[in-house]
Image (tube, helix red, strand yellow):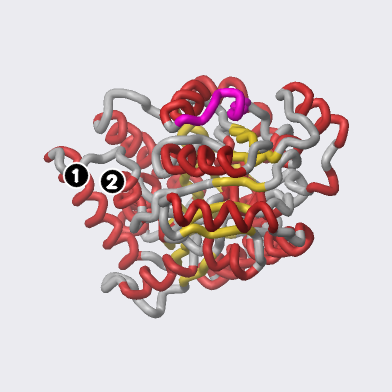
């Protein structure tokens, strides 16, 4: 019997962060059960690492996965990134020298730079997991100001690397069918390179309205002063960056004028004062806003209080590559969404599974059109849930990853 193929997975997101636990570890658990030894190299932030490292170790226990955490460098800007690149390269080299890695599998940005370096220097196979158009997303999200000479230089450097990464890839993953079309048009892409579309997956067992503890949901409603007749529109996740807080508040204000029973539940880890202040800026009364923290296990019960869930994302070039995890989670709960076009495959998914409303313009007329429909609409929540099972299931994603691993390594 041949020995297991050895794969080094590199992530700049920590496994002690929520994203690592929802969008990295579940895939690797499945792959490790099909004859692959996985070395998981991640950058961990000190505070959450100390708090959550034991839970991550428990998640990995029993799987053929070796976790190699390194410290994430927070400051100073730019120099800290260079330090992390050097740290990842040094650690990756040590892992390869000791274990003879067959393939490196990387997330975009810094990890893919390290993956390309390993491909060129060590001859390992390179799976380029393009979860976003990285350099453009930094600009679109306001992290890199292209008007500043330093950030313009950094942007150009990363774009040059991204082009070479595509040219040198042994396989490519993207999150959306829109991104797939774009990548196939890039001059660096070779038609012979396997390219798979694998959207972000949702935990369909956790996000399941039929498994909600009704006592917990009732307790949450009481805690937050949510009454049985309230028309709850929720928002799930962080705010700012690509999420259009101002436009969402303008929409909520218009809803409050047309639906007197409407309240807006923000389930967000931070910036609650910003949420309330932005609402006030657009004339939305504070008693209409509910902002709360929640653990991941508490989120489904809170979401179950929703009539709809809202998210507007900046419809820019980089977001064509985006698959919002929250969309899969909301669909898994059977909750119709109010969202905007121009973000990955979201519009097509909503329309296919009749899972809410999609807005094309952020103006009063467009808002009113949606709100009028919201009041009268009736949705088949089982149909929405079925859409999540078809499009966002971990089982389907894992099968696609396994097929791609086999193509590259066998």
- Of 267 and 92, which appears nearest the observer? 267
Quadrant of res 274: top left
Task: Estimate the x, y position of residue 117 in percent, counting from the top left.
Answer: 32, 52
Label 2 close to label 1 by CB (< 8 Å): yes
Quadrant position of the C terminus in the picture: bottom right
The numbered mark, 2 or 1, whose residue comes first in the sequence reads 2
In the rendering, which numbered label is found on residue 139? 2
Q: Residue at x 32, y 60 (%)?
A: 165
Cα–Cα gap, marks 2 and 1: 7 Å
Helix, strand or loop at disc 1? Answer: loop
Q: Residue at x 41, y 60 (%)?
A: 320
- Of 8 and 237, which appears nearest the observer? 237
Task: Estimate the x, y position of residue 300 in percent, counting from the top left.
Answer: 73, 40
Q: Residue furthest bottom?
A: 191
From this view, report whether residue 120 is shown above or below residue 288. Answer: below
- Of 162 and 354, which appears nearest the observer? 354
Q: Residue at x 22, y 48 (%)?
A: 155
Q: Is residue 352 visible?
A: yes
Task: Estimate the x, y position of residue 53 in percent, counting from the top left.
Answer: 61, 27
The residue beneath circle 1 is: 146
Q: Residue at x 59, y 44 (%)?
A: 258
Quadrant position of the N terminus in the picture: bottom right
Magenta extent: 283-292
Q: Is 291 a magenta residue? A: yes
- Local packing at callout 2 (Cα closer than 10 Å; few below 14, some 14-19, many 20+) is some
Q: Specify whether 400 is left or right of 72.
A: right
Q: Specify whether 187 is left or right of 248.
A: left
Task: Estimate the x, y position of residue 184 in percent, counting from the top left.
Answer: 37, 74
Q: Is 106 a magenta residue? A: no
- Of 228 and 392, which appears nearest the observer? 228
């Amino acid at each position: 019997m041949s020995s297991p193929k050895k794969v080094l997975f590199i992530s700049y997101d920590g496994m002690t962060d929520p994203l690592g636990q929802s969008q990295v570890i579940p895939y690797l658990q499945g792959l490790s059960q099909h004859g692959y030894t996985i070395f998981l190299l991640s950058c961990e932030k000190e505070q959450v690492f100390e708090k959550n490292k034991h839970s991550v170790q428990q998640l990995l226990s029993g799987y053929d996965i070796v976790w190699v955490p390194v410290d994430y460098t927070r400051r100073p800007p730019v120099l800290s990134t260079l330090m992390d690149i050097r740290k990842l390269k040094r650690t990756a080299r040590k892992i390869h020298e000791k274990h003879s890695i067959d393939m490196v599998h990387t997330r975009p940005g810094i990890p893919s730079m390290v993956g390309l370096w390993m491909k060129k220097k060590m001859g390992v196979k390179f799976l380029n997991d393009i979860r976003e158009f990285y350099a453009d997303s930094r600009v679109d999200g306001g992290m890199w100001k292209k008007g500043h000479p330093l950030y313009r230089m950094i942007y150009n450097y990363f774009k040059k690397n991204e082009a070479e990464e595509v040219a040198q890839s042994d396989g490519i993953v993207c999150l959306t069918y829109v991104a797939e079309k774009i990548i196939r048009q890039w001059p660096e892409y070779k038609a012979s390179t396997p390219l798979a579309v694998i959207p972000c997956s949702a935990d369909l067992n956790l996000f399941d309205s039929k498994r909600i503890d009704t006592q917990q949901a009732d307790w949450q409603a009481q805690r937050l002063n949510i009454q049985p007749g309230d028309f709850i529109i929720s928002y799930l996740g962080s705010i700012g960056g690509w999420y259009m807080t101002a436009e969402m508040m303008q929409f909520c204000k218009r809803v409050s004028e047309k639906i007197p029973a409407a309240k807006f539940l923000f389930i967000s880890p931070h910036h609650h004062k910003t949420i309330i202040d932005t609402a006030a800026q657009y004339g939305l009364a504070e008693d209409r806003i509910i902002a709360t923290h929640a653990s991941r296990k508490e989120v489904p019960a809170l979401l179950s209080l929703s009539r709809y869930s809202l998210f507007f994302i900046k419809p820019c070039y980089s977001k064509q590559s985006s698959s919002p995890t929250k969309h899969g989670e909301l669909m898994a709960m059977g909750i119709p969404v109010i969202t905007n076009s121009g973000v990955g495959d979201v519009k097509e998914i909503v329309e296919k599974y009749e899972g809410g409303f999609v807005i094309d313009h952020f103006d009063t007329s467009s808002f009113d059109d949606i709100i009028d429909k919201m009041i009268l609409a009736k949705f088949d929540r089982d149909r929405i849930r079925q859409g999540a099972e078809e499009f966002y299931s971990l089982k389907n994603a894992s099968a696609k990853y396994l097929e791609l691993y086999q193509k590259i390594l066998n």
